[in-house]
Amino acid sequence: MKAVVFDCDGVLVDSEPLAERSWSHALGKFGYTATPEDFEAVLGRTAVAGHAYFAGRTEIPPLTEFRTHTGEYWDAHLDELRAFPDAVDVVRHLAADGIPLAVASSSGRAELDMKLARFDLARYFDFVIGGDEVDHGKPAPDLFLRAAEGLGVAPSDCLAIDDAEVGADSAAAAGMRVVRLTRSGEVSARHTTASSLDAELIEMWLGLR
């Protein structure tokens, strides 16, 4: 049986701009101005990895305390979150066709569940796993391997869709076929690239058409 494993942020939910602003808000309190290069370096990684990256560049408090500062901005702007319409359509279409679906995200599980519930997407997924539920986040293969296990399929029978190079590398390391979704039109040097989601194309990639 073939299956599809989605990242959440940047693929299903347009949450990365809000995440970047929340990090900028928190870092600014400690005198650091984050650059686009900083955010590119942490794109697709867990909060633990992101915090470690910035802690290597400026003095910031431990993650538990730092999260209170990112959280205050996030909570105040939560209404800005949007789901990508093409992703919603694709998920509904694939689920209706009986294709097993999973989410493997670097977001913590509580935050991930909130995003999926907010846009009524949770019911379409057979398995969901967050970055705080594995020992090693992306680019290690742990999240995608756990997703395949949770779906009861071999990694080689899964198509993974991730917007970050580090996420695409993670899925490839797990032995999955990978599509990197780059809505900006950027082309990956290492992975098949798409700028939007299309259910028929995904089913073709799965060999179902």
Image: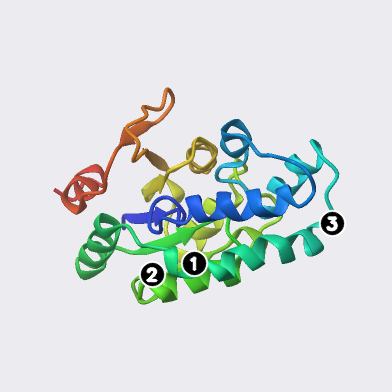
Helix, strand or loop for disc 3? loop
Query: Amino acid under label 1?
Result: Val
Q: Quadrant of the N terminus?
A: bottom left
Q: Is residue 117 left or right of residue 75?
A: left
Q: Is residue 209 above or below residue 71?
A: above
Image quarter of residue 58: top right
Determine the CA span between mark 1 and mark 2.
7 Å
SS at badge 2: loop
Q: Nearer the viewer, residue 162 or 75?
A: 75
Location of residue 12 (image quadrant):
bottom left
Q: Earlier in the sequence, mark 3 or mark 1?
A: 3
- Residue 171 in percent (x, y) is at 49, 43
Q: Nearer the viewer, residue 119 or 204?
A: 119
- Name the residue tied to disc 2: 125
Relative image position of residue 135 (x, y in whole percent): 71, 55
Instruction: Tell me, yes or no, if residue 130 can be seen here.
Output: yes
The reply to whether discs 3 and 1 touch (Cβ–Cβ < 8 Å) is no
Per the model, the C-alpha gap separating discs 3 and 1 is 28 Å
Measuring from the top left, give residue 203's x and y in whole percent.
Answer: 21, 50
Residue under numbered circle 1: 128
Q: Residue furthest left?
A: 209
Q: Could you tell me if residue 46 is visible in this image?
A: no
> In the shown orientation, is residue 205 left or right of residue 54?
left
- Tag on residue 62? 3
Query: Residue at image x 62%, y 41%?
Result: 42
1 and 2 marks in contact (CB < 8 Å): yes
From the viewer's perspective, is the residue at label 3 or at label 1 nearer?
A: 3
Q: Amino acid at mark 3?
A: Pro
- Mark number, residue 45: none
Q: Residue at x 43, y 64 (%)?
A: 80
The alpha-carbon separation of the residues under discs 2 and 3 comes to: 34 Å
Residue kind at label 2, given as amino acid type: Phe
